Image (spheres, rainbow, N blue to C red):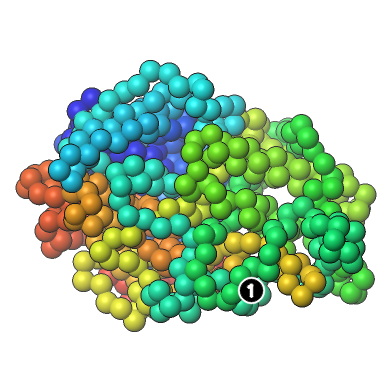
Amino acid sequence: MSPDLCIYGGTSAGVVAAVTAAKAGRSVLLVEPGRHLGGMTSGGLGFTDFGKKPAVGGLSREFYRRVGKHYHADEAWLFEPHVAEQVFKQWLVEANVKVLLEHRLAEVEKESGRIKRILLAHVPSDEFNAPGPSTHLREHVTVEAAIYIDAGYEGDLMAGAKVSYTVGRESISKYGELLNGIRDHTPKHQFPVAVDPYLKAGDPSSGLLPLIQPGDGGAPGDRDHRVQAYNFRLCLTRRRSSRIPIAPVGGYEPSTFELLARYLDALVAAGKSGSIALPLKIDAVPNEKTDINNNGAVSTDFIGESWRYPDGDYDLRRKIWHAHLRYTQGLLHFLATDPRIPRNLRQEMAAWGLCKDEFADTGGWPHQLYVREARRMVSSYVITQAVCEHKRTVDDSIGLASYNMDSHNCQRVVQHGVVRNEGDVQAPPAGPYPISYMAIAPKADECENLLVPVCLSASHIAYGSVRMEPVFMQLGQSAATAACLALERKTSVQDVNVQSLQHRLLDAGQVLAAPKSAESRPR
């Protein structure tokens, strides 16, 4: 195959990039390793983290209008997963985009600083849409495109092209970011009472309970390899006619959740029983369904189990994916059945079930693991906390971000004899801020025909603000528009005329400068 543009990753950014290039008259191939399109937007995250709505423009805004049309509204920012995927699929059909599902990257060949070709292996995903095992490799497909876009959450094409990247948190001294590095203060999603961490209470020699990592967490401000926790965003319902009971997979052990039971016991002992609730953030989306996220000290975030995912091979990622699935299923079953959970909470949890009309081919479970952060490119320009706080100017804006600098916890350790979560940060930016074009383009001497709108060049804490689905869609559109310019003028992506790019983006409805007023919703 020899398309003008090959986009690797059928995320929301990948779909929008494909539609953008196809509408500009370019031949496009969209490659997705799984069998579903839309990434997290169709994978359970139906309660959109938009930050400030006026900062969202272009085809990103068009997506929410198309979803709104389904619900007979001007726009919809709350939606069911299957509706989002239908919108993405229809968009691709309208644009006549060729899509290749269940094909993943096997090899990247470079020549003279450019990607010459990529080799794709056909690997069917398993029953939960997790990456298929390497033993199931089938036929290969060779793609020789003029320009490539890596729109995946993992940055596999970027890494395969030997583009510089990092994983984990920078030290506070790296870019002068006080919110980066190992944290000395983690007030949110924390244990407000002392919880004994040992298998035999009070006996360190007995070992640690499950869900706790060894060590004391490290020195505050230092860099580390840890990435924030992943989870599944759950679409559940209490409507009996469409509810599927939640059952654990094989190997369920109630002892896995001893930490949660002890935590609830400690709340009661401290006289805080009135604050006990289901440790879930339950947000309503249409038709009596939910988008459920992490909430509290022990919840759906599988803290500590994401660290090896970014650089892991496909087989390791598959194991991590299924470990998250088993953890989530076990947690919900524990909450609904274990006698140490207060009776009212057990009854409340038992009333929820999976939705028969969502994620039908994965048994009601989301088809997308929430990979909040994986590899991050290191380019000639790095988005940092200073950009989010308007302390550093950007002249080559290709879109805006506006959400909090938001990191979920990165580890759960023992400090001073009790359990502590570490890494959660929730800090607002100074307002909507621009994203530099050079943050999605590799260094010029590393790759001339690749753009990276998802695993873009940003520090850990700045990425926590950028990493929202409406922003990824905007950057997908901007990357594809830049690719079209590079093709027209036969230049490298680094030599694209930014003013010409900005004119095209503005004509397409993209928002490049902060609006005077903006609407936001606390999350």
Residue ranking furthest to the front:
205
* Residue 269 x %, y %: 92, 71
* Residue 57 x %, y %: 32, 58
Position of 61 relative to 127 (above/below): below
Q: Is 424 on the left or on the right of 243, as rendered?
A: left
Position of 469 relative to 366 (above/below): below
* Residue 521 x %, y %: 52, 67
Quadrant where the image shows the N terminus = top left
For label 1, the crowd category at 10 Å Cα-Cα, with few meaning under 14, some 14 to 19 and many 20 or more, is some
Position of 30 relative to 491 (above/below): above
Quadrant where the image shows the C terminus = bottom right
Residue ranking furthest to the left:
489
Q: Is 322 on the left or on the right of 2, as rendered?
A: right
Between 38 and 338, the residue placed more toward the observer is 338
Residue at 40% from the left image edge and 74% from the top image edge: 174
Residue at 35% from the left image edge and 74% from the top image edge: 387
Residue at 61% from the left image edge and 70% from the top image edge: 218
Q: Would you name the residue on which mark 1 appears?
A: 186
Indicate the secondary structure of the residue bearing disc 1. loop
Q: Residue 138 lies in what quarter of the image?
A: top left
Q: Let me know if residue 96 appears in the view.
A: no
Residue ranking furthest to the bottom:
391
Q: Residue 106 lies in what quarter of the image?
A: top left
* Residue 451 x %, y %: 26, 49
| Residue type for callout 1 | Thr
Q: Is 417 on the left or on the right of 360, as rendered?
A: right
Between 370 and 40, the residue placed more toward the observer is 370
- Exactly how many numbered labels are in the figure? 1
Residue at 61% from the left image edge and 46% from the top image edge: 232
